[in-house]
Amino acid sequence: MKISIGNDHAGPDYKIAIVNYLQSKGHEILNHGTDTFDSVDYPDFGHPVAIDVETGKADLGIVICGSGNGIAMTANKHQGIRAALCWTKEVSALARQHNNANVISIPARFTSIQQAVDIVDTFLTTDFEGGRHANRVNKIACS
């Protein structure tokens, strides 16, 4: 699977751990995140991930910022994106099962690195259930 990842200054260590884990599983990574803790603007890293997923350059996306909110809001400005803020494996599973989320947003200041890796693993290994959920997902986009 090809996965696009982006992060601001709150998540370089999270990104490194997640990328290492994903590469160990054979996934290809498109890295749009910063590698430093110097203050940066999360939209500069969220938009490229959203574009990768929206255009099919990546299968799924991962975005990381302090609360997970700002970068999720950024990604969700793209019509083809359903970015879900996930802080537990259970929320991550439901984001895929019921919402067909294609981008996961990790709140670095509210999860441990191991929790984040587990959340991402759940996200990548959970399928969309379709059925009644498909009708709802089809109503999300504004176009």
Image: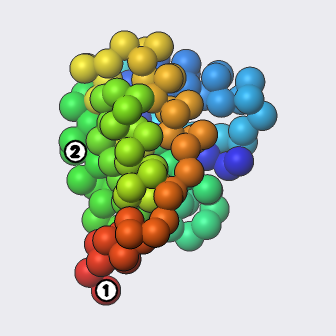
Quadrant location of residue 41? top left
Q: Secondary structure under badge 1?
A: loop
The residue that disc 2 covers is 70
What is the total number of numbered labels drawn onto the structure image? 2
Q: Earlier in the sequence, mark 2 or mark 1?
A: 2
Q: Nearer the viewer, residue 50 or 48?
A: 50
Q: Position of residue 121 (x, y in %)?
A: 56, 31
**Left or right of 53, for residue 79:** left
Camera-near label (2 vs 1) is: 1
Q: Position of residue 30 (x, y in %)?
A: 62, 45
Q: Nearer the viewer, residue 127 or 3?
A: 127
In this rendering, does residue 29 appear at all? yes
Spatial distance from mark 2 to mark 1, Cα to Cα? 23 Å
Judge the density around disc 2: few (<14), some (14-19), many (≥20) Cα neighbours within 10 Å: many
Check the image and tell me how it is coloured.
Answer: rainbow
Looking at the picture, does residue 17 appear above or below residue 100? above
In this rendering, does residue 101 appear at all? no
Amino acid carrying mark 2 in the image: Gly
Q: Position of residue 71 (x, y in %)?
A: 29, 45
Which residue is at a point 74% across and 24% down the rendered structure image? 24
Amino acid carrying mark 1 in the image: Ser
The residue that disc 1 covers is 143
Which residue is at a point 61% across and 46% down the rendered structure image? 3
Which residue is at a point 32% across and 23% down the rendered structure image? 108
Judge the density around disc 1: few (<14), some (14-19), many (≥20) Cα neighbours within 10 Å: few
Q: Which mark is residue 104?
A: none
Q: Farthest residue in the right direction? A: 26
Q: Position of residue 68 (x, y in %)?
A: 27, 36
